[in-house]
Image: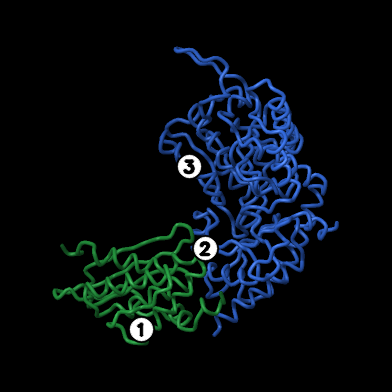
Chain colours: A green, B blue
Amino acid sequence: MELKELYQEIILDHGKNPRNKGKCDKFNKDAKAHNPLCGDKVHIYLKLNKDKKVENLSFEGEGCAISLASASILTDVIKGKDFFTAKKITNEFLNVIKDEKIISTDTLNEDQKTSIMSLSGVKEFPMRVKCATMAWHTFISALEGDNKNE
Amino acid sequence: MDISFIKSQFPIFKNKINGKSLVYLDNANSSQKPTKVIERISNFYSKEFSNVGRSVHSLAVTATNRFEETRDLVKNYVNAKSREEIIFTKNATEAINLVASTYGEKFIDKGDEILITELEHHANYVPWHFIREKKGAVIQFAKFNDRGEVEIDEIKKLITNKTKLIGITHLSNVTGAILPIKKIADLAKSKNIPVLVDGCQAAPHLKIDMQELGCDFYAFSCHKMYGPTGVGVLYAKKEWLDKLPPYQGGGGMIEEVKKDKITFPGSPTKYEAGTLQTAEVVGFAESIRFMENIGIKNITKHEKEVMEYGLEKLKKNNSVKIIGDPKEKGSIISFTIKDIHPHDIATILDDDGVAIRAGHHCCQILHDKVGVAATARASLGIYNTKEDMDVLCEAIEKCKKIFEK
């Protein structure tokens, strides 16, 4: 496994300039996670509107390049998707990290697929898998969790 | 000293890591094992194994003798007054838990104070936290200064008439600071406060002499001393072992068992319940012989030389920030690199065969105070050389190149 496959330009870019960082406007769901082994933290904020669409999505967090890039890519590709599509993409991503599958959903454009696939390099680095998956698991917890205002 | 000969006694270095020669700089976490230790364990199982201290057949006698020989070697290694003061545990963590449970149970009450430091490994904080919860005791934290060391005056300031125990690391596993144990023990003695020392990072690298240090309890783990996993040692002054209750109950640690009454033998038997890590304890004898053959003073001197060489080189790199700058420093260098997370550093270094640790090193209190979630740590052993430090520095340059893209 080549190191450059783990630290691809897309990942380094998202790691250095994470998209959708901070608390998004009028979020009504959130969830956070912490990896006690390495100290990585992530907090996902999202607004699920009446049509069950993820209208807004953002994160706060600290951690390695992989964990920041993963959270950033997540917000980038999921924002605007409806509840079920968001879950489907997340599950597909988690499967990509587990085995060889590629992202097959037709709701993502080529750039988005490339971004997600750039994270798949971690499967060759077992100690770093959690860095890439933590934000996605946390996103599902937020999405399926109770509304803030209820 | 012929380091390449010493290194040749460690079979792990014959393997390639990611196609590269291994530069093992994770010794504060655990050290590698020489052939003699590995073979001793295998030979013991092949030729001498039996449970110890129970049966009267020939194998049991041999095994018991081998096991107890290690106790004598440890007694001499730490210069304890008697072999009864050496208790085998599964690791230093269990050794500290043993003291926290027994001493804490008997001598710590509501409102009493336990004085530890901000440098402590979780192993010398969490057991005291349990006593805090159980007994309503208070934990005081002696602060570390800008250099990452705890000064004697800071300890002096925090001692009150409620202080019931001082728990302190001998050598910080993050800043590398060597603490003035003798001075602290002298001070504590004048106030009748027992001192427990977490000696995990000191025992493999410094001369540890219980008569000179004067502490009441001293805990260390054998796997950091070129020895097997699963064995730790608690040194405790005999007067305490006579006073304290047993720790775990079970076979081997009893004198007489009746339906209405159980009596216990003296130390160390009282504290060694159940079958211990027999083969590992026997194997540990070879670790002590290995270290004594080199000479602990030679080990300290060599590691210090290599550490100082590496430290100077790292200090010249503007992107590298060293955590702590203690006057008395063991062979541990913790650092951060600007804009690169320690986990990314560790992964990139690993690609060059350089094994370091990244994380909070079980010292969250320290990392919170420094204001970082994690650091990278290079920690040395007897087999490390200045060339290893060169490889480390080159690999750090590679990290910077990858992230500069």
Crowd band around label 2 with a 10 angstrom C-alpha radius: few (<14), some (14–19), many (20+): many
Q: Secondary structure at mark 2?
A: loop
Crowd rating for badge 1 (residues with CA inside 10 Å; few <14, some 14–19, many 20+): some
Q: Residue furthest bottom?
A: A110
Q: Residue at x 66, y 75 (%)?
A: B317
Q: Please check whether the numbered discs 3 and 1 fall on a single chain.
A: no
Q: Residue furthest left?
A: A50
The image shows residue B397, relative to residue B96, as above or below, that is below
Q: Is residue B353 left or right of residue A72?
A: right
User: Mark 1 = which residue?
Assistant: A112
Q: Which residue is mark 3?
A: B139
- Discs 3 and 2 share one subunit: yes
Label 3 crowd bin: few (<14), some (14–19), many (20+), radius 10 Å: many
Separation of marks 2 and 1 at Cα, in angstroms: 31 Å
Residue depicted at x 34% and y 74%: A22
3 or 2: mark nearer the eye: 2
The amino acid type, in three-letter code, at marker 3 is Ile
Residue B333, image x, y percentages:
65, 62
- Alpha-carbon distance for marks 3 and 2? 24 Å
State whether residue A116 is above or below residue B140.
below
- Asked whether B14 or B141 is in front, the reply is B14
**Type of the residue with mark 1:** Gln
Q: Quadrant of the C terminus of chain B?
A: bottom right
Foreground mark, 2 or 1, reads 1
User: Could you tell me residue B395's position as x and y percent?
Assistant: 65, 74
* Front-lying residue, A140 or A106: A106
* Separation (CA) of disc 3 from disc 1: 52 Å
Q: Secondary structure at mark 1?
A: helix
For the residues labelled 2 and 1, say whether their Cβ atoms are less than 8 Å apart: no
Query: Label for residue A75?
Result: none
Q: Which residue is mark 2?
A: B374
Q: As drawn, which residue projects farthest toward the front?
A: B46
